[in-house]
Image (cartoon, grey):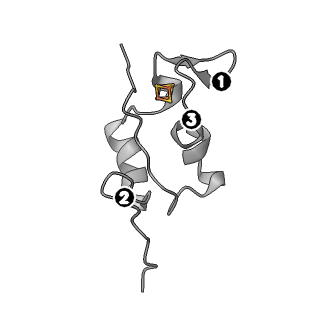
């Protein structure tokens, strides 16, 4: 029986194994490291947003991302 993962809101669901696979399959871009507002020297957001949940490390297998809260940043910009 699969573990039940709690959904916090309609906008903040759990990270699932399917989503982790889809990141790779579809080459999804949504992380701070892929955003123009990310300062690579300070590793901070230019807007001063807290960004821990939008960083590559949050999704790294060694940090066991499954079940953590998935939070998309509304200010993410690749341009
Ligand atoms: S705007 Fe959002 S995605 Fe971009 S660096 Fe800031 S927190 Fe990260």
Location of mark 1 (residue): 43
x and y percent of residue 57 in the render?
62, 41
- Give me the C-alpha separation between circle 3 and circle 2: 23 Å
- Give me the C-alpha separation between circle 1 and circle 3: 9 Å
How many numbered dots are placed on residues in this image? 3
Q: Which residue in the rendered view is the most extreme toward the front?
A: 48
Tell which circle, 1 or 2, labels the residue nearer the N-terminal end.
Answer: 2
Location of mark 3 (residue): 51
- Where residue 18 is drawn, which disc sits there? 2
In the image, 70: left or right of 26?
right
Q: Which residue in the rendered view is the most extreme toward the bottom?
A: 1
x and y percent of residue 35 in the render?
46, 22
Q: Secondary structure at mark 2?
A: helix
Q: Residue at x 62, y 24 (%)?
A: 44
Q: Is mark 3 within 8 Å of ligand 1?
A: yes
x and y percent of residue 48 in the render?
57, 24
Q: Is residue 14 above or below residue 54?
A: below
> Mark 1 touching mark 2, by CB under 8 A?
no
Q: Residue at x 43, y 60 (%)?
A: 14
> Mark 1 touching mark 3, by CB under 8 A?
no
Q: Is residue 65 above or below residue 73?
A: below
Depth order, front residue of 15/27: 15
Q: Residue at x 40, y 26 (%)?
A: 76
Q: Secondary structure at mark 1?
A: loop
């Amino acid at each position: 029986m699969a573990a039940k993962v709690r959904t916090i809101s309609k906008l903040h669901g759990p990270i699932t194994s399917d989503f982790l696979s889809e990141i790779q399959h579809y080459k999804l871009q949504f992380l701070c490291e892929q955003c123009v507002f990310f300062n690579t020297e300070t590793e901070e957001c230019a807007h001063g947003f807290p960004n821990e949940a939008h960083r590559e490390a949050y999704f790294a297998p060694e940090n066991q991302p499954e079940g953590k809260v998935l939070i998309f940043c509304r200010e993410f910009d690749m341009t």
